[in-house]
Image (spheres, helix red, strand yellow):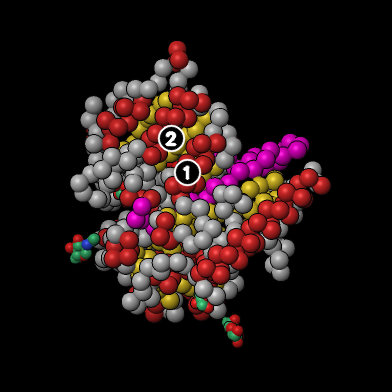
Amino acid sequence: MDAKTGRAEVLGTVVLLLGALAVTYILWPVPPPAPHGQGQQSDSCQLVLVESIPQDLQVASSPAQPLPQAWLQLLDAARESVHVASFYWSLTGADIGVNDSSSQQGEALLQKLEQLPGRNVSLAVVTSEPTLASNSTDLRLLVAHGAQVRQVPMRQLTGGVLHTKFWVVDQRHLYVGSANMDWRSLTQVKELGVVIYNCSQLARDLEKTFQTYWVLGAPHATLPKHWPGNYSTHINRFHPLQDSFSGLPTTAYLSASPPALCPYGRTGDLDALLAVMGGAREFLYVSVMEYFPTTRFRHPTRYWPVLDSALREAAVSRGVHVRLLVSCWLNTDPRMFPFLRSLQALSDPAASISVDVKVYIVPVGNHSNIPFGRVNHSKFMVTERAAYIGTSNWSEDYFSSTAGVGLVVRQDPPHSSPGPAPVQEQLRQVFERDWGSPYTVSLDGQAQGQDCAWQV
Ligand SMILES: *[C@@H]1O[C@H](CO)[C@@H](O)[C@H](O)[C@H]1NC(C)=O
Ligand SMILES: *[C@@H]1O[C@H](CO)[C@@H](O)[C@H](O)[C@H]1NC(C)=O
Ligand SMILES: *[C@@H]1O[C@H](CO)[C@@H](O)[C@H](O)[C@H]1NC(C)=O
Ligand SMILES: *[C@@H]1O[C@H](CO)[C@@H](O)[C@H](O)[C@H]1NC(C)=O
Ligand SMILES: *[C@@H]1O[C@H](CO)[C@@H](O)[C@H](O)[C@H]1NC(C)=O
Ligand SMILES: *[C@@H]1O[C@H](CO)[C@@H](O)[C@H](O)[C@H]1NC(C)=O
Ligand SMILES: *[C@@H]1O[C@H](CO)[C@@H](O)[C@H](O)[C@H]1NC(C)=O
Ligand SMILES: *[C@@H]1O[C@H](CO)[C@@H](O)[C@H](O)[C@H]1NC(C)=O
């Protein structure tokens, strides 16, 4: 099927589905059954927030479950296939010449991955080329055990990197979040993600994005002008998946970046972020590692106010309470702070404009032997209406040339309590915990100089 027929067909299907949906809504006050689940085993999607907390951090518990256990549980559940997309791999301390007990969980994870092919579970990996972890032997080891590995030369293809991080297990379960396949993501870096179990419609949809990387990792691959029709999706911003997750009416879709890796129907990651921001009426809380309304890797630096403007607009035009939590560590570029101060300067309680910016600093403590650890790497946003969990820093390059994904999800509250809290409420609790934590300082506060590049 050529791209044009594919597009026409998808468009036709979307129009039909929308028509059918409109009719269903009129006739039926309750949420209709999901319209695009033909021929699949009956699903009962279950969504769980997952996080890593760096060792020795005194952090109250949250609705999120520990990431290391969630990853092991996914591998134990695998029966047929495990597909992993990760910026880079570094699951052993030896990779970076570190001998520290906190690398043991990563090493245990690598062992479980090695055992998959022997259990008849195929393992396919896509990663960025060239890699950050040049000394790592993880991928050679996995190949020796029967895994298939492809490296995607994003720099040649789009001028970016494959910064994405997700798993698809048995075309049925998925993980999306900030954690790379790095032992430090389990014990030294603050990470946030989501696991969705028993949800083949979303898992198959994420697999389509995995397949875009997979073909680009083949020898001599070029970027297609139009992706073939079988890469297109009809689960997107305009037509999210509608289903019941653990009994809660839920809508969800997956976004992707850059636009060149968005086949027909796929919502771009930037459009997903802007849609969630534009939908906020009460509050908009953002947690990102880095915040630059500019390009970061392209020179000369260009001003890029898209997300910055959306935050300002929410605060000034709609009276939304905006909070931005960014990370500071030894490798933070101090040029970020003037942009943060500029945002904070809008705050004017008398005019009902509420903008607050704070900085999270993970203390290095006695972990100074571990390079590039001890940072909050999470990237998420939550409003009273929706949760967004992504893999990208907030600067232009992450949306124009770098490959990443995002998940937008919204749940209605349960009819009767007790019941599971909607995901946006759980994520708000995670944010509020960190916003009020002793590791968080305001912009006019005193940064602990030895752990953060920014001196006041
Ligand atoms: C790789 O190993 C070499 C030799 O042991 C070392 O000099 C280099 O710093 C290591 N590179 C990384 C990224 O750890
Ligand atoms: C790592 O350190 C432990 C003790 O801290 C030591 O027993 C072990 O031999 C070291 N391993 C390597 C490979 O250096
Ligand atoms: C793996 O799958 C093959 C073919 O499906 C089957 O013959 C074999 O018994 C399986 N092995 C294990 C260890 O399950
Ligand atoms: C997924 O569904 C299977 C049954 O199809 C069930 O046994 C399993 O517990 C479910 N997993 C989760 C995490 O809900
Ligand atoms: C689309 O079809 C081609 C050709 O049959 C196949 O190689 C590719 O894996 C398919 N892609 C997806 C996402 O299904
Ligand atoms: C780190 O990430 C978490 C979750 O992503 C976020 O809520 C928090 O505010 C961020 N800051 C710190 C220091 O943890
Ligand atoms: C590192 O510091 C923490 C407290 O910050 C302490 O609990 C732990 O025992 C220390 N570890 C070592 C090896 O000194
Ligand atoms: C985000 O930005 C920081 C600082 O430039 C960089 O170290 C990190 O790799 C970037 N990407 C991710 C995934 O956070």
Residue drawn at (48%, 34%) of the image: 285
Coordinates of residue 135 in the picture (x, y in percent): 26, 66
Residue drawn at (40%, 53%) of the image: 185
Coordinates of residue 301 in the picture (x, y in percent): 23, 44
Categorize mark 1 by other alpha carbons within 10 Å: few (<14), some (14-19), many (20+): many
Residue drawn at (52%, 50%) of the image: 407
Query: Label 2 sits on what residue type?
Result: Ala
Is residue 409 part of the magenta span, yes or no? Answer: yes
Q: Which mark is residue 232?
A: none
- Upstream in the sequence, badge 1 or badge 2? 1
- Alpha carbon distance from label 1 to label 2: 10 Å
Which residue in the protein does label 2 denote? 310
Coordinates of residue 106 in the picture (x, y in percent): 41, 60
Q: Is residue 250 above or below residue 153?
A: above
Disc 1, SS: helix
Look at the numbered disc 2 and say if its residue's Cβ is closer than 8 Å to ligand 6: no
Coordinates of residue 386 in the picture (x, y in percent): 57, 40
Point out the image quarter for the N terminus. Answer: bottom right
Disc 1 + disc 2, Cβ < 8 Å: yes
Query: Label 1 sits on what residue type?
Result: Leu
Disc 2, SS: helix
Q: Nearer the viewer, residue 318 or 187?
A: 318
Categorize mark 2 by other alpha carbons within 10 Å: few (<14), some (14-19), many (20+): some
Q: Residue furthest top?
A: 350
Please state the extent of the stretch shown in magenta in the rendering. 400-429
Which residue in the protein does label 1 denote? 273
Q: Is residue 310 above or below residue 225?
A: above
Look at the numbered disc 1 and say if its residue's Cβ is closer than 8 Å to ligand 6: no
Q: Is residue 152 above or below residue 268?
A: below
